[in-house]
Image (tube, rainbow, N blue to C red):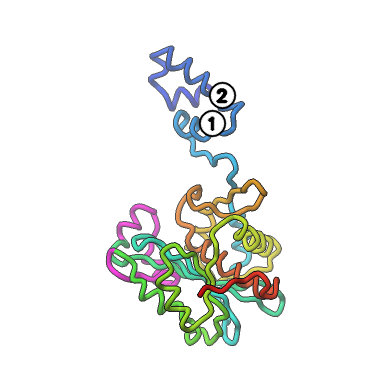
Amino acid sequence: MTDDLILKHANPVALEVPEIWEDLVKKRLYAIVQESARENFLTKHCNIIYKCAGTESFIDIASLRKCRSNKIDWEGREIYVGVDLSITTDNTAVAIASVDENNRILADCFCFIPEGRIEEKNRCEKLDYRRFIEHKKCFACGNKTIDYGFVEDFVKLEEKFNCTIRAIGFDRYNAMSSAQKWDKIYKTVEIRQHSDTLHAPTKLLTEKIINGEFEYEKNTLLEINFENAKCVYDTNMNRYINKRKSSGNVDMAAALINAVFLLQQDIIFEGGGITYAV
């Protein structure tokens, strides 16, 4: 708000043209008093990446990492599956969640990317997807687009984990065809991607993590998704992850919230609020 050196470094031409400098000072004063103008001013005129008004980080990453474990035994458990199917060129995610005897939420998440775009994604996102694939938290399927058939088969996790799938929750965007196939075998739930629906599972997951009542298998890619995730509030102060305002991929976090939604409706609310898709 007061350091002129920041403006000078970001706008060297203003040192030569007094009119530009005067205009920058006026814009800075306006950004000080008008919060909605700050993001544009700091980003455009100060070269500062600013988290815009109304957004906040989803969860403190240090709190999340305290909940990390090397292995979760899923045998005999009832699990809820959350799916976040993207456009076929982007990341897709599947998450599973359950509750243990101590009322802790147990979770694991998996990412799917097009095999033919691995190097491109490594460069653009500055990540090593081959390492995530090696750790079996990410799967490359298809060529330039994701093979939805691979994801549809992967979701049938009962044999892999020797568990029981209670329900599969999905966002209808890009998922209707897959959901119809799953619905022939499992209960499927279309989860409305709106603040009034997502607030409750977002709040529950946040509280469980903060209180140490959450456990997930070691998963660096999931942690990156949590770091990327930014939350906003609607007019009723419902808090939810906003993908557009987030700073990178958040598909795994979104899939996990879908899974937690099912768990919350079925166990905590005893099925009173769950609506099964036809």
Q: Position of residue 41 (x, y in %)?
A: 49, 30
Q: Is residue 55 above or below residue 259?
A: above
Closest to the observer, 12 or 255: 255
Are the residues tagged 2 and 1 within 8 Å (C-beta)?
yes
Q: Is residue 52 left or right of residue 128?
A: right
In the image, residue 56 lies in the stretch drawn in magenta: no
Amino acid type at circle 1 is Ala
Amino acid type at circle 2 is Tyr
Q: Which residue is the site of mark 1?
A: 37
Q: Position of residue 194 (x, y in %)?
A: 56, 56
Quarter occupied by the N terminus: top right
Q: Is residue 76 above or below residue 144?
A: below
Numbered tag placed on residue 30 in the rendering: 2
Q: Position of residue 156 (x, y in %)?
A: 46, 81
Q: Secondary structure at mark 1?
A: helix
In the image, residue 142 lies in the stretch drawn in magenta: yes
Residue at figure coordinates x 48%, y 15% from the top left: 22
Residue at figure coordinates x 69%, y 61% from the top left: 207
Numbered tag placed on residue 232 in the rendering: none
Q: Which residues are magenta?
A: 119-144
Q: Is residue 37 above or below residue 110?
A: above
Mark found first going from the N terminus, 2 or 1:
2
- Which residue of the protein is positioned furthest toward the top in this rendering? 18
Q: Residues within 10 Å of mark 1 (few under 14, many from 20)?
A: some
Q: Secondary structure at mark 2?
A: helix
Residue at figure coordinates x 47%, y 65% from the top left: 172
Q: Is residue 109 visible?
A: no
Q: Position of residue 104 (x, y in %)?
A: 68, 72
Q: Quadrant of residue 274?
A: bottom right
Q: Is residue 48 left or right of residue 199?
A: left
